Image (cartoon, grey):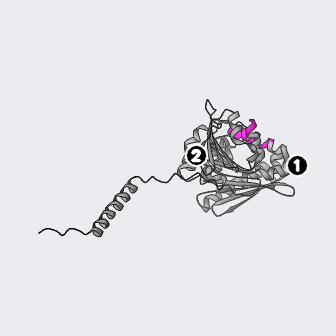
Amino acid sequence: MRLARRSGPARLAAWLLVVASSAAAVGCGSARPPPPQAPALSVPNDAVPPDLDLVIRVDLAKVRSALGPEGLATLRRGAANAAGTETDSDFFTRALEHADIACLALRPELVPGEADNVLVLAGHFRDLDVEPSLRRAGWASPLDLGGAVWRYERAGKVSRSGAVRVYQFGDEGLVFVSPAEVDSVEAVLEHGMAPNSLKPEARGVLAFAARLRALRGGFGARYPAVGHVLADALRIEGNVDSTANGLLLELSIEFGNNEVAREAEDDLERIRAALAGGEGKMATVAASAKLEAVGTFVVVRVPLDRGIL
């Protein structure tokens, strides 16, 4: 039996259906994935990779207000001692002057002055002219990562602690990366890996957080009695804030359980009392220190009067 030939309207409808289906198939086959999301820097710690063991946050606005240019000069020297960064460069000096917050993360158990590190500056860098300034210093043209984020590379030999990569986040953020940290910072900023869990408190002039493995080596060699007490500690956090008479240092040392924390408090109290019985500034500082076990933590508070500083 012969099938009835479709009428004109029916043939047109079938043809349109075939064309529409073909067009949809072609469109699906050629669809491109969305571009990668641009890196974001909501807070400085967002750029710190998880492999670094010491994170220091400095409120540069407070330092500048309290200590003036001398305070910033002291910070530059401290950064040089801690991480070996090229803090005498013109660009770094001007960046520090325009920054409100500095976040330095490092791995301090390596050779002093050659620590792997990441430095994040948050502030107002419009007047810094980042691209021409870096180009004049020998850096290559930046790679545009989208979202007003650029990545700069420096060719040639760079010291282990020197900056070989810089990320620019608009006019508000700069990230300096040493050679060994390039891959891990890229994984955090560009590929969504979680940043470091060490997050210093956003209070005080200076705050820090550290895994104790970062401090046991050199610190334990200099102060073996304290190093022995800290052998069972998990992590330490602290901050320094200004007071009417000077500064207040507060440390929180975390241990595995309450009993270990109480034993550590007793051991540290014996060390404090021995130091207080001596002479000089260390004895004065030890005499004014207060210790308290709070759950799994030992909290140490040390007032630092202007005369000691």
Determine which residue is flagged by label 1: 307
Which residue is most to the top? Answer: 157
How many neighbours does mark 1 have within 10 angstroms: few (below 14), some (14-19), or many (20 or more)? few
Nearest the viewer among 174 and 31 is 31
Q: Which mark is residue 248?
A: none
Task: Give residue 125's position: percent from left, percent from top.
Answer: 73, 47
Inter-mark Cα distance, 2 to 1: 42 Å
Q: Quadrant of the N terminus?
A: bottom left
Magenta stretch bounds: 73-91
Foreground of the two, 78 or 227: 78
Query: Percent x, y for residue 164?
Result: 62, 37
Task: Classify mark 1: helix, strand or loop.
Answer: loop
Against 307, residue 180 (above or below) is above
Judging by the rendered image, the residue that carries numbered circle 2 is 185
Q: Three-letter amino acid code at disc 1? A: Gly
| Residue situated in front as seen by the camera: 139 or 250 | 139
